[in-house]
């Protein structure tokens, strides 16, 4: 029989791709010690500092990206954050290209755009400050992500090789993510991306 704490954990998992944050669990009466005991019992996996996953989602190719996105605002539930896509933390740059399945960029860090500054010591997390219009954000696999057009503009802004940009645009056009007429010069505004990137210290 499930304990009250296990039911709480499972309820959080159910609405968040099999993930939860320590802050969310503590807010609902599950202590850090209880989470640690559940981990020892094999009931959940610790996938990052302050982030746990259900064993059922082991092997999910988006697990690390989703965990990184949760870490941007660890107290808020996914359903709360998705009410305002443009400001909740948006997957961007090479990470966005990977989600759209366009181009062949190496996404060796999880990249996001946020309207506010976030302090993080998480390795492999990169956050840039930006203001996005609603039309520049879409949902892919449940995550807010810059549209293909905005993604290409952002990558051009940071100096991505023109040949790689051409491949991205061609793939996006073939997938119907941008008009074919825009495959060489995607029709998205450059927005207000800060030139000062924020890296973990």
Image (tube, rainbow, N blue to C red):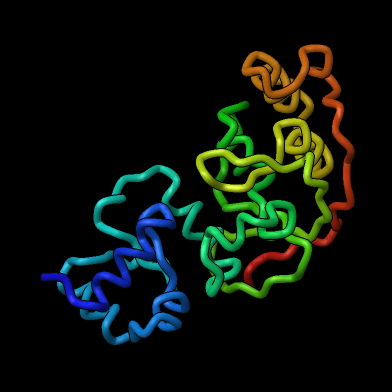
Q: Nearer the viewer, residue 124 or 83?
A: 83
Image quarter (top left, top right, bottom left or bottom right) of the C terminus: bottom right
Q: Residue 21: image x %, image y %?
A: 44, 71
| In-image side of 74 versus 191 (left or right) | left
Above or below for 24 versus 113: below
Above or below for 7 versus 66: below
Q: Residue 125: image x %, image y %?
A: 59, 60
- Kindly indicate the quadrant of the structure image that contains residue 134: top right
Image quarter (top left, top right, bottom left or bottom right) of the N terminus: bottom left
Above or below for 62 versus 147: below
Total labels: the figure holds: 0
- Kindly indicate the quadrant of the structure image that contains residue 186: top right
Identify the residue at image location x=77%, y=31%. 149
Identify the residue at image location x=21%, y=80%. 37
Q: Residue 152: image x %, image y %?
A: 76, 33
Identify the residue at image location x=74%, y=27%. 165
Identify the residue at image location x=43%, y=57%. 16
Q: Residue 27: image x %, image y %?
A: 45, 82
Above or below for 40 versus 97: below
| In-image side of 39 versus 122 (left or right) | left
């Amino acid at each position: 029989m499930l304990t009250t704490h296990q039911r709480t954990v499972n309820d959080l998992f159910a609405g968040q791709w099999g993930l939860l944050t320590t802050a969310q669990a503590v807010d609902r009466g599950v202590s850090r010690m209880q989470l640690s005991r559940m981990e020892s019992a094999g009931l959940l996996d610790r996938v990052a500092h302050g982030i746990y996953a259900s064993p059922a989602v082991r092997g999910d190719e988006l697990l690390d990206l989703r965990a990184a996105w949760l870490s941007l605002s660890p107290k808020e539930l996914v359903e709360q954050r998705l009410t305002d896509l443009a400001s909740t933390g948006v997957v961007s740059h090479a990470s966005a290209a990977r989600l759209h399945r366009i181009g062949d960029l190496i996404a060796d860090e999880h990249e996001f755009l946020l309207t506010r500054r976030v302090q993080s010591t998480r390795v492999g997390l990169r956050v840039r400050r930006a203001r996005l219009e609603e039309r520049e954000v879409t949902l892919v696999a449940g995550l807010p992500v810059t549209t293909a057009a905005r993604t290409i503009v952002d990558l051009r802004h940071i100096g991505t090789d023109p040949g790689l940009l051409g491949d991205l645009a061609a793939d996006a056009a073939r997938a119907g993510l941008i008009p074919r007429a825009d495959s060489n010069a995607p029709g998205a505004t450059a927005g207000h991306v800060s030139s000062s990137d924020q890296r973990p210290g």
